[in-house]
Image: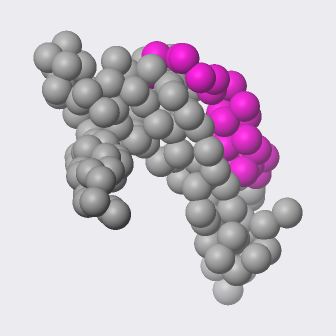
């Protein structure tokens, strides 16, 4: 019985050392999101954004659509379904100018903090805005 109790104590001490010594105890995803969002500005290149926020797993390509409203053709942009991100493919598409309307990346840091970065056809930031999170839906966001 004493051996089992001693084993639990050793496991508990090891877990605490890993948690606090490894930096997990002080990690704040919300603060990391706010810092990244504040550092991204309009006109930055996609590589600068990736250095700040990280490389995304998926992104959306902006697609131009047309609709007839009141006898006039109206053009508007719609994001495509999520596409798996490949840095090599993005570089190739930007070099070929095959993303004329740009692309969008949403960074989800937590259920409280997320933001969307919109890039133009050259791969530069055109806008950054808050994305809807679970905290927004439940109206619990500060």
Q: Nearer the viewer, residue 55 or 118?
A: 118
> Most extreme residue toward the top, as rendered?
95
The answer to which quarter of the image holds residue 137 is bottom right
Q: Is residue 32 visible?
A: no
Magenta-drawn segment? 21-46
Q: Nearer the viewer, residue 13 or 135?
A: 135
The answer to which quarter of the image holds residue 124 is top left
Residue 119, percent from left and from top: 43, 30
The answer to which quarter of the image holds residue 55 is top left
Residue 141, percent from left and from top: 78, 67
Identify the image quadrant of the C terminus: bottom right
43 sits left or right of 14 in the view: left
Question: In the rendered image of this protein, does residue 55 appear above or below residue 132?
Answer: above
**Residue sitting at 17 percent across and 26 percent down?**
98
Residue 13, percent from left and from top: 74, 58
Residue 106, percent from left and from top: 47, 48
**Residue sitting at 62 percent across and 72 percent down?**
134
38 magenta-colored: yes
Q: Is residue 138 visible?
A: yes
Identify the image quadrant of the N terminus: bottom right
20 magenta-colored: no
**Residue sitting at 31 percent across and 47 percent down?**
75
139 sits left or right of 89 in the view: right
Question: In the rendered image of this protein, does residue 17 appear above or below residue 103?
Answer: below
> Most extreme residue toward the right, as rendered?
142
């Amino acid at each position: 019985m004493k051996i089992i109790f001693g084993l639990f104590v050793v496991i508990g001490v090891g877990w605490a050392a890993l948690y606090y010594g490894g930096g997990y105890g002080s990690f704040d995803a919300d603060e990391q999101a706010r810092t990244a969002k504040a550092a991204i500005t309009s006109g930055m290149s996609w590589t600068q954004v990736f250095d700040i926020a990280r490389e995304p797993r998926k992104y959306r390509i902006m697609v131009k659509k047309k609709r007839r409203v009141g006898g006039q053709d109206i053009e508007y942009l719609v994001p495509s379904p999520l596409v798996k991100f490949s840095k090599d493919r993005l570089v190739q598409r930007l070099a070929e100018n095959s993303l004329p309307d740009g692309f969008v990346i949403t960074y989800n840091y937590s259920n409280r903090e997320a933001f969307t970065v919109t890039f133009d056809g050259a791969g530069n930031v055109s806008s950054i805005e808050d994305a809807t999170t679970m905290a927004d839906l439940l109206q619990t966001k500060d």
